[in-house]
Amino acid sequence: MIQRLLLSIPLLLILGIYNAAYAQELPDLGDPFRDDFSLFQEQVVGASIMGKIRSSPTYVSDPEVIEYINHLGYRLVANSDSPGQDFQFFVLINPTINAFAFPGGYVGVHSGLILESDNESMLAGVLSHEVAHVTQRHIARVIAAQNKARIGSLAAMAAAILASRSSGDLTQAAVMTSAALPMQTQLNFTRAHEREADRIGLRTLEKAQFDPHQVPLFFRYLQRQSRLYESGIPEFLRTHPITSDRVADIEARLTKMARRQVLDSVELLFLKARLRVYQEGAVSAFEIFDEQIQSDNRAVKLAGMYGSVFSLIAEEDLYLMDLEKARETLDSLLKEEPGHPMLLSLQADFERLFGDRKIADKVYLSALARYPDRKSLVYGYAELLLSSQRYVELESMMSGLVLSSESKNPKFYEFRAKAYSGLKQKMPMHRDYAEVLALTGNLVGAINELLLAQKAIDGDFFLRTSVDSRLKELREVQQALRQ
């Protein structure tokens, strides 16, 4: 029941790591790396939570969004105290203004926060604060205080608290376990944690060549919003309460930091357009884009042109704009930003859906030669191969990506599984679908797919060995989560 609820609720966000108000100062937690919550446990709990989030309809799998938020995030990580630490940044569709982090180096951002950020430095300021929470292991230190908590109970507790905080409805809170309820108030950052994240975050922001003076401007904006709408306090204020002392401390530190004029990247304009379509719907967003196209401001005009064409692609329908006008808009965009990977991907996707597939094929291949790691181009070309039933080419492409990728990408396995399905190869198909399910948090489904793979008779010795080995690994993880 809890799992079904988690997959249906819209937030899937605040993960029980934060609370609506500060907790009392916690006592010294001692060594944050003690065995109570080891790095291995942190990774298992984080992966378990992230699996549930990826299964949510609010999770943004758009490769352009993932590309941008991770590029921005790792620019900050590279200038942090732990530049070699692994992070995963992601976006969820929710109009509230919030960002959060949880075990394993995962940092999530609401679409509302990105859309309401006036500039890239504001957005980077929020991310740098969350990065600091992770690099200083604030989350691990707090969880380590729960001496008797084990991996399974920690993951379940985080999921249960997540469910309760996604809504004010007490009936949803009732699904929480009896163990999670009393521990909820203990999973809060202290004032000291927030001050430390502020201090380190500002330093990281400055080193990454952003303007740290945008941070208090963003805080003041949120505070004004909370005064104007008493019932709509920005989520970021609830989960990261801003006291007068905290603001004063930030402003005192900023006196020693120079102001910096930072030009926003065109990628942020395009990203906001995509998120507006996802958050508000293509029809409502298109009306905004149509007005923006009339603007004399180049940035606003570019965002409008990009958003209007993307609205058609997102809907896979031309009812919002006729083909000729759409082509004119796309051509104008390409003249303004020739060779930009986001525009090449937009052009190829447009041709694939509404134009000539041969042209789409050429655009994809030409763009991939320049930007071989661009996921939007990879996925778009994979969709073209799949819809054209070019299964051998699709399998070859995805196998190369699976082997060369440093981290496992569920989309690569999903496309390869579809290629194997088209080629009538059952064992590798079930193996790859198992990987997709495992990476999206469905361990039971993944194990069942591997059992089906074992029953298939079309695999060689090496494939069978890999299936058996993976099945053993997933059962060990399942057992760990039950403890």
Image (spheres, rainbow, N blue to C red):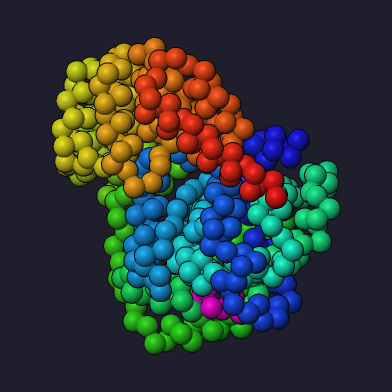
Examine the structure image and report whether residue 194 is included in the region drawn in magenta: yes
Q: Is residue 294 visible?
A: no
Residue 460 pos. (x, y %) = 37, 21
In which quarter of the view is residue 25 placed?
bottom right
Q: Residue at x 60, y 61 (%)?
A: 236
Q: Nearer the viewer, residue 214 or 375?
A: 375
- Asked if residue 3 lies in the magenta stretch, the reply is no
In the rendered image, residue 459, in percent from the top left (x then y), is placed at 39, 20
Residue at the image point whose x is 62% and y is 42% from the top: 478
In this rendered view, identify the residue nearer to me: 354 or 192: 192
Question: How far across and down, in percent of the image, does residue 400 sit?
Answer: 27, 34
Q: Quadrant of the N terminus?
A: top right
Q: Residue furthest front?
A: 461
Task: Specify start and end residues of the magenta stretch as a single range.
Answer: 192-198
Tell me if I can see residue 426 in this picture.
yes
Principal SS element in the magenta part?
A: helix
Instruction: Provide residue 234's location: percent of width, then percent of height.
Output: 62, 59
Asked if residue 101 lies left or right of residue 373, the reply is right
Q: Residue at x 44, y 57 (%)?
A: 87
Query: Which quadrant would residue 22 be assigned to in this image?
Result: bottom right
| Residue drawn at x 32%, y 49% as measured from the top left | 267
